[in-house]
Amino acid sequence: MHIIALTILRYESTLKIQGYRLWTIKSLCPREEREKSKVPGFKYEVCIGLTSARAAEILARDGPNALTPPKSTPEIIKFLKQMVGGFSILLWVGALLCWIAFGIQVAQGVASAFDNLYLGVVLALVVILTGIFAYYQEAKSTNIMASFSKMIPQQALVIRDGEKREVSAEQLVVGDMVEIKGGDRIPADIRLIFAQGCKVDNSSLTGESEPQSRSCDFTHENPLETKNIAFYSTTCLEGTATGMVINTGDQTIIGRIASLASGVGNEKTPIAIEIEHFVHIVAGVAVSIGVLFFIIAVSMKYKVLDSIIFLIGIIVANVPEGLLATVTVSLSLTAKRMAKKNCLVKNLEAVETLGSTSIICSDKTGTLTQNRMTVAHLWFDDQIYSADTSEEQTTQSFDQSSQSWAALSKVVTLCNRAEFKPGQENVPIMKRVVVGDASETALLKFAEVILGDVMGIRKRNRKLAEIPFNSTNKFQLSIHETEDPNDKRFLMVMKGAPERILERCSTIMINGEEQPLDRERAEAFQTAYMELGGLGERVLGFCHLYLPEDEFPDTYPFDTDSMNFPTSNLCFVGLLSMIDPPRSTVPDAVSKCRSAGIKVIMVTGDHPITAKAIAKSVGIISANSETVEDIAKRLNVPVEQVNKEDARAAVINGMELKDMTTEQLDEILINHSEIVFARTSPQQKLIIVEGCQRQDAVVAVTGDGVNDSPALKKADIGIAMGIAGSDAAKNAADMILLDDNFASIVTGVEEGRLIFDNLKKTIAYTLTKNIAELCPFLIYIIASVPLPIGTITILFIDLGTDIIPSVALAYEKAESDIMNRRPRHKKKDRLVNEQLAVYSYLQIGIIQSIGAFLAYFTVYAEQGWLPNTLLGLRVNWEDDYYNDIEDSYGQEWTRYQRTYLQWTGYTAFFVSITIQQVADLIIRKTRRNSIFQQGLLRNKVIWVGIVSQIAIALILSYGLGSVTALNFTPLRVQYWFVAMPYAILIWVYDEIRKLFIRQYPGSWWDKNMYY
Amino acid sequence: ASSSLGCSSGPSGSGRRGPENKDEERAQHSEDEQEKRKEKMGKKTLADVIQEMKTFLWNSEKREFMGRTAQSWGLILLFYLILYMFLAGMFSFCMYGLLLTLSPYTPTYRDRVSPPGVMIRPYLHGFTIAFNVSEPSTWTPYVNSMHHFLQAYDDNIQEEKNIECPAGQYFVQDGAESEERKACQFKRSQLQNCSGIGDPTFGYSTGQPCILLKMNRIVGYRAGYGTPVSVNCAIQKGNESALKSVDFYPGNGTFDLMYYPYYGKLTHVNYTSPLVALHFTDVKKNDFVPIQCRLNGEGIVNDVANDRFLGRITFTLSIRM
């Protein structure tokens, strides 16, 4: 039980997060829960915590201490959405028309009425099956996420009924007294009433990477800033504390942010918009052609019922039934491929979003950097040395021959409290787990790499006394025996803030010699210190002193409280500077982004200098670009006088951002290509994202903390870190980087762009044959020839032979370096543009139709029906009673003989489309390059597609040719080759098209023929 | 409001082009801004949409019709004209090639048309022959149909155009394919009571109707493979006694071999299909009597479920007195 500090938070209105309750300790700890302090001399009362009964009461009132999961759409709604989305409506209309036709025909007693019933059922089945498929795909990717959000039940140490007990954190209520210690996760928002050396990691909440100390002092009006509140889901790094729960569950800061995130609307992904656009085009074409020909048919004196049946045929022919499923499969294939490269995609459509990304707002810590302090520079002998900061360092290559280095290394090794956890001898040094803070860890690992066996060295130089670092002294000191048995002197080593260390020194070591620290030397120190500080690095000074043997004999009792040893006139040894270094893959990735036309903006909570340094080292600010401040400094003029457009780079502080209007922010985003936002808050991150989106950019945001979740949600694609990321961030994100590595984003961009290109190809491939399916109906209506291809047969193309080939196009390699072009413009570079539709429909589609009609005419002519006989034949042909129609040779045909011939015609037409689709598939491999440049055999899956296509056609014709319901017949072998010249024509024509596009870029041909 | 052409229409640059279309970009930019301003003002009103449609149809500033200038339309139409003319030429060439491979006398394949189907006359778009003996208007259409059909079989026409052939054997005429073939006489009078000569009403006026049965023609088909194909009729389903007697003409209801093979309508111009007349002398009256007549002979198929006219025919007689 602890003493209550009755500090009252008065300024509730300053709180950014609306509705955050600030209980006073007084109100939370009613009289009956207090008792007189037993501590002598204290006249305050102490809080004995809640009684179980009272806790249960409050629990019943407030609910459990857990975040309400975001509202999810009921499964049945999701399922139904799949049933009516895309082309489904059109197909439902088709099915409905079929059943209406069936009803009428049954009433009229037409023998073939049931065909329409079956067709309607088939159409409905198609919709339902593709719906189930899409639903299943979506559910599968959601399931990946479910595993992420599983949280381990947390325990909390709470004082109830006057005694400590462990309860599940969910049971905590407002007013509960809880105790926390280093390593614990804070179980609720807690107002501290007792703290001892308590430090918390608020990085997931505020983005500050430094541990924050906590005490009972009320230091700020803003609950986020004040030191006496610890927040739910942050971690206590060290020390202990006791506090009173002031908010639980959704009322906590985290809960507020989470609800802020869920309040941010989910906009449609770019690919969803593109697919919708495409669906509109196709549906528009289908409906307008359907209605047009319905009118034509009616005015040509066809019966209305017949016209309805034509309408069904036209709809079925126009709608690429299998395409949406194909797109889903292609996207999920890419998602799988990306998951292999450590990009886990939650939402399938986000696969492509990354490809159209034009701005990446990247977090610094952990994403761009390694998220661990590493020694970057050393200064000794009046010279700055750089250290290797890569992830896998095994040696350091700077000059280690100097005696000064020997001295410095000794100080670094000995004046250090960090230790490796035991049992890691076989683990690479950089990966070993260390007990100690970030700087000391960095120094320990640095020493271990160079000297090896630091622990051994420390053992040989026994530590006699130690003063740990504290914020008043700003230094750390220890006294050691030396490992040289002949040297009986003690070695005192000290490290700390460089200026403080220098103050205590009178000499400086140069090339192993102690030299007086004169003004010149001190200035050299200043220059080096400023330079390293200017790199955004954390600089530490090191000094030592060999205590004279006579004054400090073997048995000298060192006392750290009275400091009975000299702490001035020491010998300065050197400086070491540390930084959280960029990941080695990042600079390359950033330059790739740049050449891909993607603007990389750094948004960090860190200090501007550090942020700028990292930005420079990874290339976010390129070597030769300057900020307004840099120009001002170079020209030696005030900042206001600098022409802002001269500066390519900009470093914006969170404080500046706070005072900016939207217009000013827009101006910055437009005028500067290299931008760093430092010291930004979660709300500001959201503002930045919105600013980018106002520029019509597709914005990707990376983040790991809870504070990032609103921005992640707001972004077109939110990318959460898999290792460092909080659950809230992962929930809000569309994609998760499993290795927290920025370079993985570049891979994602590449895959995203590739899938966009390949979807274009898939759609072009699929749309082409729609014309070959549609023309038969149009000719049938206009010229009254026997029907060249049946509705069921069309479905066998759309959902049979064409499926695997169109998926195979997703495996196509990029034609050129897709990372060397700009991201596509959201509104101009459409997935399906005019050129694509026109080229597929009016050129290749027409060639295909002609090829297929040739096969149709061939089949009929060789059986005795010459083309001229066919014209206008339809009414007699379809007359069930007319069983002796004469053909061109005077032979007489029964109705069934004609029907069977008609099915043979269907099969020939079907086979011809299939054969030409093989050519279509091959030409669609590239949009610009020659097939021979692309490599005919490089994409093996295409060949799997071609084989499958032909195999399915063979099975349908010869295997299922006897099943009358399917309307296929075994086809004579030669009919398979009738459309061959047209297949070749398609290939040759497309090669010519591509040749001209390559030869005359920007020409009329290029503009009209490149899709 | 000036142009705010839909971005998807027109051959707008696809963003990968160099600096040569900077102007275009700038223009596009101002358009974007306009769009943005519109978006800010809220959703597009109907008037806006109509205005947009109007500008799309005819943009007087740029002199564009549906997003293309006259020159652009000219070029694109010329391109399609050339392309389609080429395709039409290629298609015509292919069709010409196809027709070259075809014989004008004999179809390449005859597997879909054989074995032969069967039809009857009178044929008035249906297979129910229903009439009332006492009301001539109910049966005159049938009689007319018969007369019309049998015109070509008039004895004098047959004698004039066709030759008499030896019965009981195929009338094979070898020689060049293009040579004109002779046809064998099938005189109407051979149908005796059903010829319509003695009784111009073909028995309809007495409730003993005649029905003519015709085997479908197939080029080169030798019906029966040496044995003449014969016809028999029976009640399809139901009481056998409803059909007491049927007379067949000529020759007990057989198709004589001499009428085969058929050489196609180009060379076998005067060919008349042989007929078998069925004289239903005693059929149950005032009832629907379903009758099925089948061909019988070698090579004839008359029991395929799908095709109810292959080697057989079913019709219903309904004679009211």
Image: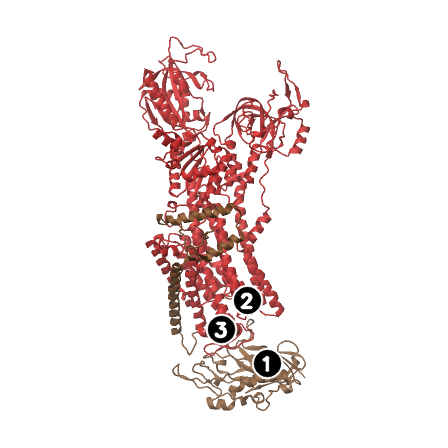
Q: Chain of mark 1?
A: B
State whether residue A626 appears in this view. Answer: yes
A913 up-or-down from B189: above or below: above
Question: Which residue is labeled 1 in the image?
Answer: B233
From the rendered image, report the letter of the chain displayed in brown. B
Where, quadrant-wise, is the N terminus of chain A in this rendering?
top right
Picture coordinates of residue A883, whole percent (x, y): 53, 76
> In the image, A595: left or right of A961?
left
Q: Chain of mark 3?
A: A
**SS state under label 3:** loop
Q: Which one is nearer the viewer's eye here, A942 or B139?
A: B139
Picture coordinates of residue A460, whole percent (x, y): 40, 18
> In the image, A413: left or right of A708?
left
Q: Nearer the viewer, mark 3 or mark 1?
A: 3
Q: Quadrant of residue A609?
A: top left
Q: Chain of mark 2?
A: A
Q: Give the amino acid at mark 2.
A: Ser
Question: Which residue is labeled 2 in the image?
Answer: A307
Where, quadrant-wise, is the C terminus of chain A in this rendering?
bottom left
Question: Which residue is labeled 3 in the image?
Answer: A872
A394 up-or-down from A733: above or below: above
Label 3 packing within 10 angstroms: few (<14), some (14-19), many (20+): some
Picture coordinates of residue A882, whole percent (x, y): 54, 76
- Counting residues from the start of the chain, the first of labels 2 and 3 encountered is 2
Q: Are marks 2 and 1 in contact (CB under 8 Å)?
A: no
Q: Give the amino acid at mark 1.
A: Cys
Q: Alpha carbon of mark 2 to alpha carbon of mark 3: how far?
A: 17 Å
